Amino acid sequence: MKKVFLTTLILLTTLAAVADEVTFVTSAPKAVVVNQQFRLKYTVNRHNVKEPRLPQISDFRILSGPSRSQQSSTQIINGNVTSSQSLTFTYILVAEKEGEFTLPGATVSVDGNEITSNKVTVKVLPQDKANAARQSASQGSRGQRQPGNTSVDIAANDLFMTATLNKTNVVEQEAVLLTFKVYSAVNLTALNGKIPDLKGFQIQEVELPPEKEWQLEHYNGRNYRTILWQQYVLFPQQSGEIEIPSATFEGVVAQQVRPIDPFDFFGGSNYVEVKKELRTPRLKLNVQKLPSGKPEGFSGAVGSFKISSSVSATELKANEAVTLRLVISGTGNMKLIKTPEVEFPEDFEVYDPKVDNKFSLRTNGFSGNKVIEYLAIPRFGGDYTLPSIKFSYYDIASKQYKTIETESYLLKVEKGSNEDNAAVAAYVSKEELKLLGQDIRFIKRGEAQFARKGDHLFGSTLYYICYIIPLLLFVLYIVIHHKKVAENANIAALRTKKANKVAVKRLKVAKKFLKENKKSEFYDEILKTLWGYMSDKLSIPVSQLSKDNIAVELEKKGVEAQLIAEMNNVLNECEFARYAPGDAGEAMDKVYKMSIEAISKMENSIKR
């Protein structure tokens, strides 16, 4: 009892600690249709809470609410207790006019504290013209039974796909966003296809959420469920008018079909899968050449960029490494930016720069940082200047070239203790640097091994042995291979040889059913084992097997009559026990043992 009390106390304490933080959240659809109902929800992670105080809600009419619903859950995994509880207040609203409106947060009192939920924005769409027309037509024909729609065709304006560019006039290397969007007024269940090859572009696909979310949108007088299907960022590599060809997709729609039987008073309907081809329109993009007057060092960077630099040390000794760090940040075609060259002093040993791309794809290009580290080692003492690094790019906003540069650095290098034979410092990337300042490395010490001039492997005893051994192995392989082929060619003999192995495998399956007390499956497997064994052993097709011809073939092979009778007895026992009343487990165990014993005796008898 004491243990139960302590466990309960710990659990309640843990739950109270977990539930310390209070959250109060407003949720509503992003888009609704005018004069149609929708739900406005306020959710708090407590149970004993009074009804929230709603703000003044204009442009919407509250039809009902609030209705209360609460949820709670507790999990104990490896001693860790996690719990959650929530109370949701739901109101039914209707929008009275079109536009975009903000619903302010509600206020609720929790433990004496006033908490206000977040605001939400709801876009109210006009009514669908097609639905309004259908409703008007149905009202005009009220009182008269219609046969229903029998067509499975899908209208072009019920399901289609668009392809759009966020820009139509750009310069070379300027990022362009290509978007494929689906508009559906039907039950679309699947969509397959891919974009065609786009020549003249470097293409990067925008990663969209794996679970695509449908949104409501008013388009050309109708309300559609829409979804962003694919997005690509294109970097044009050439100037001129570039055409983006049409893409073809195949949609699968669950279409409702009503019967045309006028005597069908129940108005039944069926659903069929209808495939519809969706083609996006062709698009044209005007790409202008980059203007003349490119600055020296321009390598094709287009976008908006900044540059900064730092140095690992300004005072060091000869043969010690110094790292110059350059950071190019911004948005544009960062993946195509070439690494700027740095003019180090002649007395510096310079290594290939290390480049770390810390940018990601956005809808307006790559955004982030490109970090470049230059490693250099001064070999002699003195004062040196690391010059500033210039970076030129074409700025899209101002439509002109810009050149930005870093500051220069003065390095004071002291003379090393032994400039001629000093080991250099380790590089920041942990890569091993070579040892300089020495003419000879890795001198081999110890006694030298000499060989007599003119001694070669060719013509020696070892040379001929290396030829003879592989030849003998090849001959042995040919002999064994032909023997195996001859054995496998005799299918009947092969089946007879493997009959016992196959039976043993099947008996293992039957034993599994025996342990699981699956009566029907056990007897099926035992019968397959016995009949299959006799078919393989006697080379009789399964379709021609019978107890009589088994007995005849066994007599021909010299099997004793007693053993033949015993095999027939096992088959009869198996067929009888399958439907006999009584202890199923005992009967199954008996049949299993009899089968093993009969196959074992038969195997020994036929081998003799």
Image (cartoon, helix red, strand yellow):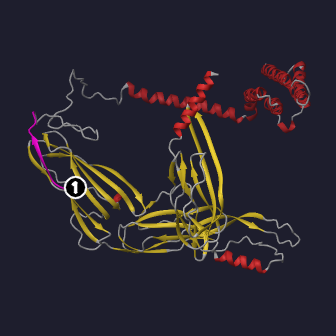
Residue 110 locus on image (x, y percent):
54, 47
Residue 483 locus on image (x, y percent):
64, 31
Seen at 72% across and 76% down, the residue is 135
- Residue extending farthest to the bottom is 140
Q: Is residue 419 above or below residue 400?
A: above
Q: Quadrant of residue 547?
A: top right
Residue behind mark 1: 341
Q: Is residue 231 above or below residue 81?
A: below
Instruction: Look at the image and tell me in which quarter the N terminus lies.
Output: top right
Q: Quadrant of residue 551?
A: top right
Q: Which residues are magenta?
A: 406-417
- Seen from the viewer's position, the closer of residues 324 and 492 is 324
Q: Is residue 575 magenta?
A: no
Neighbor class of circle 1 (other Cα within 10 Å; few <14, some 14-19, many 20+) is: few
Determine whether, in the image, residue 465 is placed left or right of residue 516.
left
Residue 399 locus on image (x, y percent):
30, 72
What element does badge 1 sit on?
loop
Residue 518 locus on image (x, y percent):
80, 31
Amino acid type shown at disc 1: Glu
Q: Is residue 415 magenta?
A: yes
Q: How many marks?
A: 1
Q: Is residue 510 above or below residue 332?
A: above
- Seen from the viewer's position, the closer of residues 538 and 474 is 538
Residue 468 visible: yes
Q: Quadrant of residue 514?
A: top right
Seen at 24% across and 23% down, the residue is 449
Seen at 53% across and 71% down, the residue is 246
- Seen from the viewer's position, the closer of residues 393 and 513 is 393
